[in-house]
Amino acid sequence: MTDTSFGQPFSQISVQELAQCLATNEGTIQLIDVREPQEVAISRIDGFVNLPLSKYEQWSDQVAIRLNPTTETLVLCHHGVRSAQMCQWLVTQGFTNVKNITGGISAYSILVDPSVPQY
């Protein structure tokens, strides 16, 4: 599914599809969590790099160095709104394979892994 509600197109991925990607990932995908550090401290999924949207000024100039714009990039937040904003920004930065994780970590906890705490 492709979302254009923020202007530039990017794809959506379900939390079930995320679980499949995580199970088979051999370093072939980039995982970004845009939640605040205090949110990550409560509930997290291993393998995600934390780039909080509120700290944009601190990491935005490093994205081109730290991430590959052609590698599949999955973006996570609490429910899927902030991650969609990040997906939009990544597309404007030239990223070509960006996917928003629909429902965020909340849906992941409910539908995939109940051991991931809700908040």
Image (cartoon, helix red, strand yellow):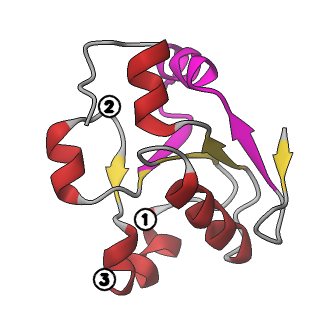
Callout 1 secondary element? helix
Residue at (72% x, 40% y) in the render: 12
Kind of residue indicated by mark 2: Ile
Whole-percent x, y for residue 110 in the image: 43, 17
The residue pinned by badge 1 equals 66
| Quadrant assignment for the C terminus | top left
Residue 58 — which label?
A: 3
- Tell me: residue 70, above or below residue 48: below
Magenta stretch: give its range: 10-32
Name the residue tied to disc 2. 45
Q: Amino acid at mark 1?
A: Arg
Q: Which of pointers 1 and 3 lies earlier in the amino acid sequence? A: 3
Q: Out of 64 and 43, give the one closest to the viewer.
A: 43
Q: Nearer the viewer, mark 2 or mark 1?
A: 2
Q: Residue at x 32, y 12 (%)?
A: 114
Viewer-closest of 59 and 77: 77
The reply, left or right, for residue 21 in relation to residue 5 is: left
Q: In the picture, residue 44 is in which quadrant? A: top left
Residue at the extreme front: 119
Looking at the rendered image, the disc whose residue lies closer to the viewer, 1 or 3, is 3
- State yes or no: residue 18 in magenta: yes
**Tag 3: amino acid:** Gln
Q: Is residue 90 left or right of residue 7?
A: left
Where does the N terminus fall, quadrant-wise?
top right
The secondary element bearing badge 2 is classed as loop
Does residue 36 sit above or below 104 in this rendering? below
Instruction: Give the total number of marks visible in the rendering.
Output: 3
User: How dense is the environment of label 3, judged by Cα within 10 Å: few (below 14), some, or many (20 and up)?
Assistant: few
Q: Is residue 15 above or below residue 55?
A: above
Position in image of residue 48 (x %, y %) = 36, 42
Is residue 36 found left or right of 57 in the rendered image? left
> Which label is found at residue 25?
none
